[in-house]
Amino acid sequence: MKSKLILGFGLITVLSTAAVAQVTSQRLLNAGQEPQNWLMYSGDYAGRRFSALQEIKVGNTEKLVPKWAYQTMAGGKFETTPLVVDGIMYGTGQDDRAFALDARTGRPIWQYQRALPQDIRPCCGRVNRGLAIFGDKLFMGTLDSHVMALDTKTGNVIWDVAAVDYTKGYSFTLAPLVIKNLVLVGVSGGEYGIRGFIDAYDANTGARKWRFYTVPAPGEPGSESWEGESWKIGGSPAWITGTYDVETNTTFWTTGNPSPSNRGEGRAGDNLYSNSLLAIDPDTGKLKWYFQFTQHDEHDYDATQVPVMVDRSAVAGQKDVDGRKLILQANRNGFFYVIDRTNGKLIRAESYAKVSWTKEKDANGRPVPAKEGSPTPEGNRVCPGAAGATNWMSPTYDPQTKLFYVTAREQCDVFSTAPQPYQAGHAYYGSAYFPNDDAAPFYGALRAIDPDTGKIKWEWKHPSPTWSGVLSTAGGVVFTGDAEGNFIALDAASGKALWHFQCGASVYSSPMTYAVDGKQYVAVAAGTALFTFGLP
Amino acid sequence: MRIYALRRCIAILALSLILGVSASRVGAQGKNPYAGDAKVAKLGEFEFRANCAFCHGLGAHGGGRGPDLTRTPKKHGDSDAEIFNTINNGVPGTAMPPNGATQQGVGMTEEEIWQVVTYIRSVEKKPGKMSGDAKHGRELFYGSDGCATCHMFDGKGGRLGPDLTSAGTSRSTEYLVESMRDPSRRLAQGISEAMKEFSAEYETVDVVTNDGTNYKGTLLNEDSFTIQFLDTREQVHSFDKASLKSWNKSRQSLMPVYDEKALPEKDLQDLLAFLVTGAAGGAK
């Protein structure tokens, strides 16, 4: 179903550019150099969610006002990070809606909603986190496991391919990533005993160019890490958008829990490549190296947090990272990892939230799961809880403060076993978990981590655990949301709150920023609405 | 990953109302094909843990959120078919969601619901007669024990604590006893916002305004910047936290501890009888 609105539109000269592909590979590679636009999910290929815009800065942020809101009128979690290209905003909504808006006014230009089958298997909400753009096409993964291309100007469907059988528990919720002429997507479904994969499709035709299974088959490297036939239903979904290093032509993806998510019995071994960072050749889909964060996971510690690329100068002043090309990741398992992205070697792992699932590190510096952390019939209290020390919400790296900002969740859970047989398309958890009963209330915090030391430079405490991501800007302001519905601007250097706005519903999205006609806007999805703010 | 999985009791009613999600709920009812089968009850126990225990507790003994299901008869129908329906369709107006309406895929199959019914039957206790005197419990509630100073029952009473009209049937006896003997151990839940993971709780608020006025009360709601509470004179307040001289929130309940001395065991049983049978429509 799609409704079209054809508007006279003064901001762009549609006719004169119609024949020219709008977004080229070169523009995507240099996304950071056109900060008025937001060309991909994390803003740039490095996954930093940082913008060079600085009209909104420390000193005037307290003057921010709402500029417009766009209502999807759809319930459930609204997780999109919209794109903005040359004055037009492109976003997605619940139940696989997509829309194009005048980024200056919020007026819709076209709207699309997929006719989803009744029996889709979303894990955790009928959500979608956004689109990718290339040429004149937008790319979307759907809850019924299709990948599709929509026309940027009309929302017309250009191609639509089924990736896999959704009735087995597969779905797409992430924003795709375009590299060269390929559209990369990773699948969701770690709750259903799927076999995870990352796919690449030809942007023009939708033809699948490669598939990398995140669970190796017998005979393939890593297959020895699975017991018996367990690899067939080993989970390891890849449900958050990756990053891309053009210098080494490597795309970095992260994977989620092995299945069943909270029960290790029956899948003895490390269960590769669950909960891992994967370095993949985007042309071929071949794995270059991997780094596994949590082996043989029994607590649902998906590693699906955006792997942020950061380059350290030769004189960074910290010997172990000077001159090195890094991946930074604050992991759901409670550790902040610094990894050499040229070879996958761990440099450091320090906890940034309360951790009890591990008590020691192995010879390679990796946390070793504690035996007493395993779920039991009576229940075992473990920190972080099942939702993790953080989750899919984006962190940000600010090259000015050189700090890494992440939404931390301080919450422990009681994990209890609940074995169940595998049944295709049926939830396959293997255990249950409950908030533990101790008197200490759970809370959330925006934490600014110094990557050189792993130390927390400041924190902004939220009253309860939150699902909002973080945006940093050259104006020295970071933006985040909270479960109480506030959208908040803070001083990136000190963590002092500068401004806030009550959106009326918990924020389950990662904010972004853009500019039209030289005026900067900040946007965030909350409840059923997408809100934008700017200076008066 | 499950990010909402068992948080379902909290905001799920509101969610499912907003969404109008029916998912693919199963249809058939009738006779439990597994009645009395111990093996099936075991399977049902696992399903129960994964789907029900978040609110109804491990072992179905109930908790702060859901009623004790070892108790009989069940409030919303006590035949196997009725329990099946309660699980499958939820209970409108309560936090009990319909099967499959939790944005968690397609819900339990018909077979699994029967397994859960079989499990619940296997842990039920013979209907224990309330030993207490409900009539006397009512007198205590509205009289000397002072419960009604802060709690309402059937529209009569105070506002500082939770309304207890349905507490007797929606909470386990153990929970009710704990709430009287040790009220700070688990605070009652307050407002649940549609998309918010955690409900507010009956925390104690102590505020000093800039002009030196001191207010004590129970929390209604709060965010990073503002706080809303009911003071001990039942006045609603809202303040910007930054405008206050001081504010403090505590998990020490305003409710006094009703220990053996303040509330002898017999009186406690009388109060329980009032809450349970009064809630079921008696002791008026």
Image (cartoon, coloured by chain):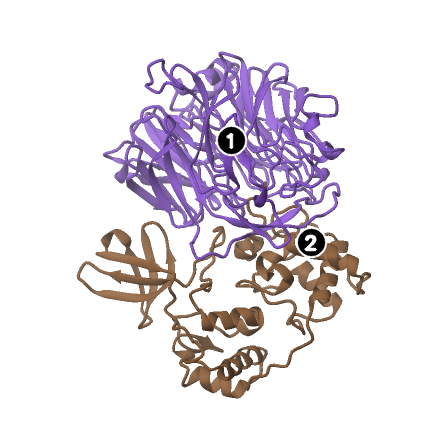
Chain colours: A purple, B brown
- Density class for disc 1 (Cα within 10 Å; few <14, some 14-19, many ≥20) is few
Q: Kindly state the secondary structure of the residue where label 2 is placed.
A: helix
Q: Kindly state the secondary structure of the residue where label 1 is placed.
A: loop
Q: Nearer the viewer, residue A258 or A33?
A: A258
Query: Residue at left 40%, top 85%?
Result: B144
Q: Is residue B246 left or right of residue A111?
A: left
Q: Amino acid at mark 1?
A: Ile
Q: Are marks 2 and 1 in contact (CB under 8 Å)?
A: no
Q: Amino acid at mark 2?
A: Phe
**Quadrant position of residue B150:** bottom left
Residue A450, percent from left and from top: 36, 29
Q: Count every numbered label the image shows and give the total.
A: 2
Q: Which residue is mark 1?
A: A6
**Quadrant position of residue A151:** top right
Image disc number at residue B46 = 2
Q: Nearer the viewer, residue A29 or B136?
A: B136
Residue B143, percent from left and from top: 41, 85
Residue A446, percent from left and from top: 38, 39
Image disc number at residue B106 = none
Visible in this render: residue A301?
yes
A438 over A233 or under it: above or below: below
**Quadrant position of residue A216:** top right
